[in-house]
Amino acid sequence: MEKKIPIRSPSTASQIIDEEAVVIVPSEQMVNILNSVGCRIWDLADGKRSLAEIAKIITQEYAISYETALNDTIEFARGLVEQKMMEFAGKDRKKD
Amino acid sequence: MHTDTDPYVRIIKKTQDRFIPFIVHWELTYHCNLQCPHCYVVPTESGKELSQEEITGILDILKESGTLYIIFTGGEILTREDFFDIAGYAREKGFALRLLTNGTLIDERVADQIEQLNPLSVEMSLYGSRPATHDRITASPGSFERSLRALKLLNDRSIRTRVKSLIMKLNAVEFQEMKKFARKIGSQFIYDTIVIPKLDGSMAPCRNCLDGEELYRLLYPEVREKGENANSLQDDLSCTAGLNVLSISPYGDAYPCMAFKESGGNLTKDSLCKIQRSPIFSKIRSITLSDLPECKGCELIPYCNRCPALAWMESGDLLGRSEPNCLLASVMRSIVHDKRRRAGTENRTPTSAQNSGRREQRS
């Protein structure tokens, strides 16, 4: 799972205001607010980084263990995928 | 429904406090294929519409400045040949789009292109439940059928559509039918009764405004018992112009709102920061009830949605009276009082009257 590459769903609309992300899924007429950590993960989900790479950045920026960051990132990304806010890119990133 | 503790409400408040242009109304063109006599638009002969390149440059600035919602309007947006390039770029940048159109240029192919944009909604003007009424107002035979076809094409694609109507003397009799009609075709219905003067100052469109009696008859069934449609801002007549709302003309001029055409600068030459600090933006933001000599102390305040731009258009005075708003507030009060009287609740404290939603307004 950690090799998966998340990307913000192109069908969403979003804006970041003071480390909070407002994310809209037009087809669902749904507005979601992501908190600071969620907003950072959202921002990093550019289709280039794997969940593991994102978790590494979260570890550094929020001073939490890598295991915690990875679990939280995976859970968060899964939730956003379920809500049609995020997708996983076709190919998983190879381990460096 | 959002509450005060709702994070979304908190973010909206933040965008207002910091003048973040969260909502942008963008008139992409003043060209239109219809000729509605009530339309406020007067194209400037010498005005040069923004190029696609200029528009994408401004979209980049707006993204960096905190904009989320862009409402593309006109004129008729689909008369711009590069509309889908512009709107597509806006979606790539992550803006939420609302599209305002008369729908007459929407066929299968255009409906497919709109579907690709994933807009929040497409809002279409409809001025009657009967073709003859609508076509008479648009001065374009066949426009009703073309708009109707567009609504069907969009609804078939599960695109959220809203039928917008301006209720005037010419179509008031069809108001209830229009509501039913919108519901039947799967569209939301929104309406307004206030006609805006033309940009060149002509008050001609306002001749079709409903008078007090007509407004009373129209709105009486719309106001729920106990006056729940009264103004939610009991002691306030503020508006969001210039706070988290920005309006852009086809020529790049930036205004505090769509109806208030005093420019704070041009986005091809001036920074957004400079525009938002311009005297006109500062002025409209600073207006409070105590600045309004004819409004402070007015007993109609709980029923009033005063628009400073309307006052300015009518009298050139931002702080003056706005007759259409005064008339509407007076009618609303009469309706609320009459409904309370009939319900036998006239002597109750009218707190509930000021606590819930307003009538939907044209935006």
Image (cartoon, rainbow, N blue to C red):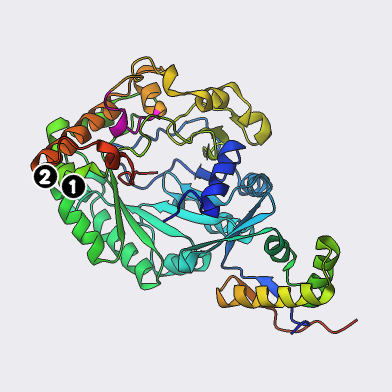
Does the magenta stretch mainly form a helix, a strand or a loop? loop
Q: What residue is drawn where x is 32% and y is 37%?
A: B231
The one of A33 and B128 positioned closer to us in this rendering = A33
Q: What residue is drawn where x is 80% and y is 81%?
A: A93
Above or below residue B341? Residue B68 is below
Circles 2 and 1: CB distance less than 8 Å? yes
Q: Which mark is residue B225?
A: 1
What stretch of residues is rendered in magenta?
B299-307
Q: Which mark is residue B131?
A: none
Question: Mark 1, chain letter?
Answer: B
Regarding mark 1 in the picture, which secondary structure is present there?
helix
Q: Residue furthest right?
A: A96
**Does the stretch in magenta take in B22?**
no
Q: Which mark is residue B343?
A: 2
- Marks 2/1: CA–CA distance: 8 Å
Q: Position of residue B353 (x, y in %)?
A: 27, 40
Q: What residue is drawn where x is 59% and y is 43%?
A: B14
Above or below residue A10? Residue B307 is above
Q: Position of residue B173 (x, y in %)?
A: 12, 46
Question: What's the amino acid at mark 2?
Answer: Ala
Of the two numbered discs 2 and 1 on the same chain, state the one appearing first in sequence: 1
Above or below residue A52? Residue B85 is above
